[in-house]
Amino acid sequence: MIHFSRWKIILIFALCTLGLVLAAPNLFSKQQLAGFPGWVPKSTLNLGLDLRGGSHLLLEVDLKAAYKERLTNLVQSIRAELRRERIGYSRIGATGEQALVVIRDPDKKARRGRGGQTNIERATKLLRRLEPGTEVDVSGARITIKYTVDERRVRDNQVLQQSIEIVRRRVDELGTTEPSIQRQGADRILLQVPGLDDPERLKKLLGKTAKMTFHLLDPRFPLGTPPPTVAPPGSFLAKHRPDKRQERQGSPPRLTLVLKKRVVVSGEHLVDARAAYDTGRPVVSFRFNTIGARKFGRVTQENVGKPFAILLDKEVISAPVIQGPILGGSGIITGGFTVQETQDLSLLLRAGALPAPMTILEERTVGPELGADSIAAGQIACIIGFVLVLIFMVMAYGIFGVFANIALVLNMTLLLGGLSLLQATLTLPGIAGIVLTIGMAVDANVLIFERIREEVASGRTPLSSVDAGYRRALTTIIDANLTTLIAAIILFEFGSGPVKGFAVTLSIGLVTSMFTAIMVTRLIVVTYLRRRRLQALPI
């Protein structure tokens, strides 16, 4: 244990130097770091919500609404398949948590070429292979189709994961750094955005599903004509978003338009959306992918001179007249928007539509003043703990305590460098983990030094005592730190938010403290003894 090969010494110095380099960026501001060369490490610690201030939101995803939309799409597929196979039905729709079809003339047999099967047999066979993960139940002329429990659970999980990804995209578009987005339970999302100075804008962005569709107007009810009280078959009624400029002047009533149910182009084909200006007006420019461009070009080519509507979350945001074929796959959305509205709308369209609506169950805003107080309290705790440990080690072990203190300083540097490399988010519990690491960092040295004292008392020479002390204390050190590391890993895996921050700092601190105690302190002690050639250990 007292022999160090050259490569070990080089590796120890290299790791310590690397820790210093990675920790150094935390001493500079972001403006100063931006002026450094590109090869210089610039990763720093990020302050969490409780230290920096920001917004805390608990969101609930409406999985029932997503399932209802899934059933609606299933009914549309059933209708299309039955029409294609020329199977008549007297009723079709979604009731509760299942789709229902009532077949007309269920016992009537098909014409030649269809196997002589009855309408109910053909329909049942068709619907059973229509979509995987569904159960088909037949009772007379009634056929019910519903998703299995396992399939519904899988799809609900997909909806939640997709919602988390869309929320992440929208928050990232705001320019915030290191948002914390975590799943809670079966249908909830915990969102923490440190440093956000406009929580109201965040809530508006997250409250919109941002599902955009393009529809043609019903030609029987052109713009300007009174809409019917009930939409005719194949159409639906939609409110038109009021023009902001006109709304400021006199709050005009919202127009109701009659639109065709058929979606000519959907927002899923959008590849880009940007805030722009058209003749001095704020607008949103958009661009489709190849499939969307082809559909959009065909629709505009076939309906020149006719109005069409752009819907966002079932509200008409623009209803322009098609002036000519738009074959390039790009266009603009006008509607009396403000500059902020065009930026938010383009952000929503770029991030994509949520698969289900979300509601805000809990909201908290942490001010930066409270975060500053927490940082000051954490700094005081770290400094007091650090100084007391330094004093105790010197008083208890003399020059060996000084060596342990040097290793402790390097340990803190390596810990800070590791957290910076991972760009970890430092929270108040994370600071508690650092304070705990300060005490645990010298724990290994205490075990080693006490073991060395026992070896000296038994009559061993200085080098032999040091060798035996490190060798015999090594097992205890590894056992103690390994069990604590396992507990920290479990905390990180099953914990959330601040608990994860505590687990991260504690885990990295355990690894760095073992390195400094077993390698750095031992190298310093062995080098000191070989140069001084002491006959008795000052411990």
Image: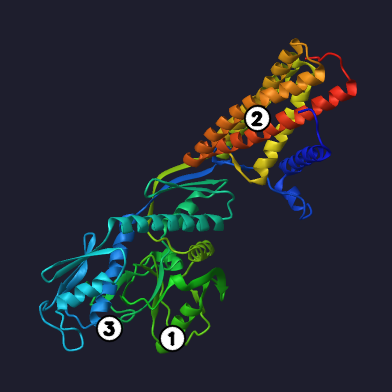
Q: Earlier in the sequence, mark 2 or mark 1?
A: 1
Where does residue 224 sit, x and y in percent of width and height? 33, 79
Where does residue 538 sit, x and y in percent of width and height? 81, 14
Task: Name the residue at 74% across, 29% down.
Answer: 407
Q: Earlier in the sequence, mark 3 or mark 2?
A: 3
Find the distance from the CA under tag 3 to the CA under tag 2: 72 Å
Which residue is under mark 2? 379
- In the image, 459 versus 267, the foreground residue is 459
Vertical comparison of 446 with 293: above or below: above
Residue type at mark 3?
A: Arg
Graded by Cα atoms within 10 Å as few (under 14), some (14 to 19) or many (20 or more), the crowding at tag 3 reads few
Eye-nearest disc, 3 or 1: 1
- In the image, 230 versus 123, the foreground residue is 123
Q: In the image, 93: left or right of 401?
A: left
Find the distance from the CA under tag 2 to the CA under tag 1: 65 Å
Q: Which mark is residue 391?
A: none
Where does residue 422 sit, x and y in percent of width and height? 64, 46
Task: Name the residue at 81% across, 17% down.
Answer: 462
Q: Secondary structure at mark 2?
A: helix
Residue type at mark 1?
A: Arg
- In the image, 225 versus 42, the foreground residue is 42
Which residue is under mark 1? 298
Graded by Cα atoms within 10 Å as few (under 14), some (14 to 19) or many (20 or more), the crowding at tag 2 reads some
Toward which corner of the image does residue 231 lie, by quadrant? bottom left
Task: Name the residue at 45% across, 65% down.
Answer: 244
Q: In the image, 352: left or right of 98?
A: right
Which residue is under mark 3? 220
Toward which corner of the image does residue 434 lie, by quadrant? top right
Q: In the image, 376: left or right of 116?
A: right
Residue type at mark 2?
A: Gln
Q: Earlier in the sequence, mark 3 or mark 1?
A: 3
